[in-house]
Image (spheres, helix red, strand yellow):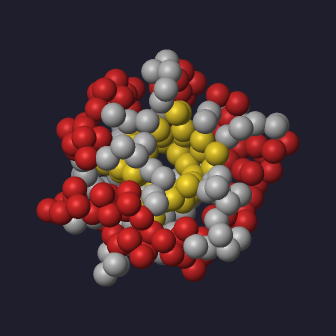
Amino acid sequence: MLSERIKIAPSILSADFSNLKSQIKMVEEAGADLIHIDVMDGHFVPNITVGPMIVKAVNDITDLPLDVHLMISNPDFFLSEFVNSGADYISVHFETCSHLHQTVKKIKSFKKVKAGVAINPNTSITNLEDILPELDFVLVMSVNPGFSGQLFITNTLEKISSMKKMINERKLLVEIEVDGGINPKNAKEVIKAGATILVAGNSIFKQKDIQSAVRAFKRLEV
């Protein structure tokens, strides 16, 4: 079985928004640990998704923590809105923050909100060396951000392992979240590499039996 430290975070980017409430309830009942919400602005990434109103609506539906991934330019302008809407985890992209320490400090000023930094597949983990001690988690993108349904980029495993090594060498309590192309077939390798939070979209919400899809992750032997 999965270690208790591993969290499963279904991504509503792949959900049926006409049945969003029932689908969120399904994953909650099946044992999901977080609800992952991708916020895209059509500027940093070539897609537009949701904003604070949807985050608030999801927060009203579930008691699960909300993992809000901000794939947006100028995230500082919107942090308080997402916190007020119910975000429990907030990740911003290294690539969008001119003053990353300042942005992370602002997230952490909201006290109970966990602060994370996301990196794209072509961004080196060395860019996070200085900020790492300030973080609660790092989000490693295993696809290029913007659209669901992409295939997992296999050399991400090496990046996860290197990130885990960096965290362990510094004796930090920083989680590694991985987002993109995760399914029960590759999840074992991702966990072995060092991931502690798995984001899954199509491999949960696009399956005929959503609850069985969540349980397939929970049953993994690692």
Please say if 22 is above or below 5: below
Q: Vertical placement of 218 versus 74: above or below?
A: below
Q: Residue at x 48, y 71 (%)?
A: 215
> Percent x, y for residue 48?
24, 52
Residue 81 appearing in the image: yes
At horizontal 45% and vertical 21% (from top left) the residue drawn is 110
Nearest to the observer: residue 100 or residue 67: 67
Q: Is residue 99 left or right of residue 211?
A: right
Would you place residue 91 above or below residue 40 in this image?
above
Furthest toward the top, the residue is 109
Q: Where is residue 83 drawn, in percent x and y?
A: 36, 29
Taking the image as shown, residue 181 lies to the left or right of residue 2, namely: left
Residue sitting at the far right: 169
Give residue 184's position: percent from left, percent from top.
54, 76
Whether 87 is drawn above or below 142: the answer is above
| Number of disc labels | 0
Residue 153 in sight here: no
Q: Position of residue 100 (x, y in %)?
A: 54, 29
Q: Quadrant of residue 214?
A: bottom left
Which residue is rendered at x = 64% and y = 45% of the image? 175
Q: Where the N terminus falls, by quadrant?
A: bottom right
Q: Residue at x 72, y 50 (%)?
A: 163
Quadrant in which the C terminus appears: bottom right
Q: Residue furthest left?
A: 18
